[in-house]
Image (cartoon, grey):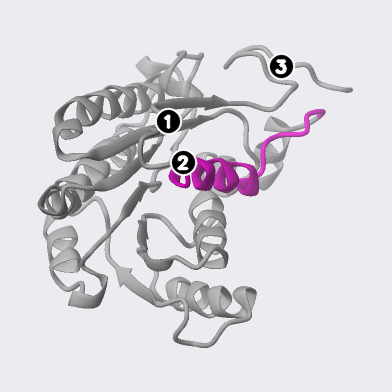
Amino acid sequence: MTVLITGATAGFGKATALLFAEKGYDLIITGRRNEKLQEMKNEIHTSTGLSVTKPKVLTLCFDIRKLEEVKKAVESIPEEFKKIDILVNNAGLAAGASLLHEGNIDDWERMIDTNIKGLLYMTRMIAPLMVKEKKGHIINVGSVAGKEVYPNGNVYCATKFAVDALNKAMRIELVAYGIKVGSINPGMAETEFSIVRFAGDEERAKKVYEGITPLSAADIAETIYWMASRPAHVNINDIVIMATAQASTTIAVRNT
């Protein structure tokens, strides 16, 4: 079986790729930095202890925000990888944390282009291949921010609310073709997420998780794999997953 994972060189995407490889899946991994993709490909074969040809790994280097690059990348997929069983729409980010009336419009554009349009572009290109086969599984990585809005999260929350809506729409529209659609919506998880959000400010990012044992990338990867490995007649529509210490987007207990 073949799984395509967007944003596969770090965080949830990387952990998910490594786990699926360990389970024997062939992989298509995507990202914007070719050197990172090649490092990831090498790491997959090292971590699985298998040969350089097993599992099969295809790297696709492109910017998910640019439709023409997405089209060109997907159209370049060789025949041996064309039967994509699982699409994990993982690529996403938060940029900035400010009040709406003080927001940075460049940050808004970046989040909208990545979190909404990138997911749409990939789904538009891959879903028809699944429709043709009359089977497949799409797993969308959302966020608790797509369930509850929190202060200074405005546009990021809006993009993840969009993912939640699109997840529901996809499921309704693809069910007739035997395609599963589900989403996983993590709460506080310590990856590069906050470092990216705060433009590389590691000290500020670290404070987000102070006094809490947050989710890890491995926690999310394990849950995605569990979703993907249910029997053919079972679909997991929607999962909200949070650290034990977190009750909502605004309420968490910190040990200080």
Q: Nearer the viewer, mark 2 or mark 3?
A: 2
**Res 78 visible:** no
Cα separation, mark 2 vs mark 3, equals: 31 Å
Callouts 1 and 2 close, C-beta under 8 Å: yes
Question: Mark 3 — residue?
Answer: 252
Closer to the N terminus: mark 2 or mark 3? Answer: 2
Q: Is residue 125 left or right of residue 254?
A: left
The amino acid sitting under disc 1 is Ile
Instruction: Provide residue 245's location: percent of width, then percent of height.
Output: 75, 21
**Kind of residue indicated by mark 2:** Arg
Residue 128 painted magenta: no
Which one is nearer the viewer's eye here, 199 or 154? Answer: 154
Of the residues shown, which amino acid type is indicated by label 3?
Ala
Task: Tell me whether the residue at label 1 lies in contact with that at label 3, contact meaning CB atoms closer than 8 angstroms.
Answer: no
Question: Between residues 177 and 82, which one lies in front from this camera angle?
Answer: 177
**Residue under label 2:** 230
Q: Which of 222 and 64 is in front in this view?
A: 222
Is 38 placed above or below 107 here? below
Q: Relative to 15, is 80 on the left or the right?
A: left
Find the distance from the CA under tag 1 to the CA under tag 3. Answer: 27 Å
Instruction: Determine if the magenta segment contains residue 221.
Output: yes
Magenta-drawn segment: 211-230
Report the quarter where the N terminus lies.
bottom left
Disc assigned to residue 42: none
Report if the CB atoms under discs 2 and 3 are less than 8 Å apart: no
Query: Which label number is shown at residue 236?
Result: 1
Residue 5 in picture, x, y percent from top left:
38, 56
Question: In the rendered structure, which disc, 1 or 2, sits on the residue that comes first in sequence?
Answer: 2
